[in-house]
């Protein structure tokens, strides 16, 4: 990954493919859909582990406004092609009506091997995420930069939560995706490696032991990308609203610039450092933006207060990267909540009105479909509320 600009970035968004009338996940997706999407929309379209999942990976970006235009076009283009195959596009960390037992893996050697290796863990992996890559200047150790970014990961998760439902039930969490993803090995908050050399040595050890085939199987919440010269954010849920994805990507990009511009010794670490961040990650996946985080001194800070502090920290970087407008959308997320908040509000409203659980969940799916591609052609729209 490279571009003629500082701190170039890329965004990967994962989606579910849904049958609009039943609101259920597709169980068999025609291979011609992916082939046609790649032919018409380019290599930005990728398959995922399950047939009901598909990914948009943006080209390398230098400008957040350009990224918005391109990703918006890709969402609309993929949605239109899906509609021609009787399907619709849905962006969320989990599908409210999804049932993993009904899903089929994508028929590719890599995915067949994942299912063989991880069995039920792979078959249950009915989740979608948002990944953001940021390229750092030459000479900046990606792992040391990653270490300094890690205390902010729970906040970035809280801003993205979109997976309150699992197996047709209210999970009680704002990000059940994170809880489900914890079933996989080598996920969650990574350890504090001294630098890229130590990280690479650990990856090489796992390869020699036959535990992994390459560093791409280190699926941590943040990592040095094994394929690009970037730091890759992986903790976020898939965002229903494109502008939410862009705001989180812009915030992470600004944070990485701030870290690169302000060299500092490695943060002090002890036995509790990673555990503390993981405790805050739990609070984020349980409560989202209502979480209260704490530090090594026991000081408590509400998520929204931490967001204000981070925005003040990176204000100069936002101006330099022309990200100020994109970051302003964080105010919208703070005021209206994330996708998880809206999903839960719709569900509760429907249930209070006497709707069955399935009918209420269909109403949630209807909103997700409309919000994922708000400019979709009317012929692909679904009803405003569930009626059957």
Image (cartoon, rainbow, N blue to C red):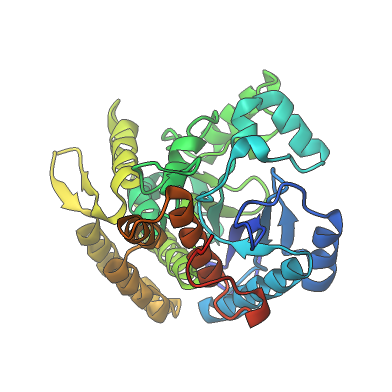
The quadrant holding residue 326 is bottom left
Q: Position of residue 227 (x, y in %)?
A: 68, 49
Instruction: Looking at the picture, tell me which residue is in the foreground, 219 or 30.
Output: 30
Q: Is residue 362 above or below residue 190?
A: below
Instruction: Looking at the picture, tell me which residue is in the foreground, 150 or 229.
Output: 150
Name which residue lies at 43% across and 56% down.
360
The quadrant holding residue 259 is bottom left
Q: Is residue 235 above or below residue 186?
A: below
Instruction: Looking at the picture, tell me which residue is in the foreground, 101 or 328.
Output: 101
Q: Position of residue 274 (x, y in %)?
A: 34, 34
Is 135 left, or right, of 33 in this rendering?
Answer: left
Q: Quadrant of the N terminus?
A: bottom right
Name which residue lies at 55% across and 60% down.
91
- Whether residue 282 is visible, yes or no, is yes
Q: Quadrant of the C terminus?
A: bottom right
Instruction: Looking at the picture, tell me which residue is in the foreground, 300 or 366.
Output: 366
- Whether residue 213 is visible, yes or no, is no
Q: Position of residue 278 (x, y in %)?
A: 34, 36
Name which residue lies at 62% across and 78% down.
376
């Amino acid at each position: 990954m490279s571009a003629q600009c500082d701190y170039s970035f890329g965004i990967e968004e994962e989606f579910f493919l849904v049958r609009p009338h039943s609101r259920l996940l597709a169980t068999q997706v025609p291979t011609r859909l992916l082939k046609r999407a790649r032919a018409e929309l380019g290599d930005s379209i990728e398959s995922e582990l399950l047939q009901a999942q598909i990914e948009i990976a943006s080209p390398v970006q230098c400008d957040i406004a350009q990224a918005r235009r391109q990703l918006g076009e890709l969402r609309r283009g993929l949605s239109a092609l899906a509609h021609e195959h009787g399907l619709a596009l849905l962006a969320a960390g989990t599908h409210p009506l999804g049932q993993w037992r009904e899903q089929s893996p994508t028929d590719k050697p890599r995915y067949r091997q994942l299912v063989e290796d991880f069995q039920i863990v792979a078959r249950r992996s009915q989740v979608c995420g948002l990944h953001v890559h940021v390229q750092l200047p030459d000479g900046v150790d990606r792992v040391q930069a990653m270490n300094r970014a890690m205390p902010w990961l729970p906040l970035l998760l809280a801003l993205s939560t979109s997976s309150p439902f699992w197996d047709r039930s209210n999970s009680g969490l704002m990000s059940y995706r994170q809880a489900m993803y914890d079933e996989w090995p080598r996920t969650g908050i990574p350890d504090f490696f001294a630098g890229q050399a130590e990280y690479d040595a650990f990856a090489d050890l796992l390869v020699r032991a036959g535990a992994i085939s390459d560093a791409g199987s280190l699926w941590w919440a943040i990592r040095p990308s094994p394929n690009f010269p970037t730091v890759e954010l992986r903790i976020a849920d898939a965002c229903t609203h494109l502008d939410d994805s862009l705001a989180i990507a812009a915030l992470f990009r600004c944070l990485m610039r701030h870290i690169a511009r302000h060299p500092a010794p490695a943060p002090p670490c002890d036995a509790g450092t990673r555990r503390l961040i993981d405790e805050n990650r739990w609070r984020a996946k349980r409560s989202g933006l209502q979480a209260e985080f704490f530090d090594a001194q026991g000081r408590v800070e509400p998520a929204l207060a931490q967001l204000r502090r981070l925005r003040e920290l990176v204000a100069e970087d936002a101006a330099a990267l022309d990200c100020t407008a994109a970051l302003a959308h964080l105010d919208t997320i703070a005021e209206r909540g994330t996708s998880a908040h809206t999903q839960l509000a719709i569900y509760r409203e429907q249930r209070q009105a006497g709707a069955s659980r399935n009918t209420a969940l269909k109403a949630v799916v209807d909103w997700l479909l409309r919000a994922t591609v708000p400019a979709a052609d009317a012929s692909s729209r679904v009803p405003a509320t569930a009626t059957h």
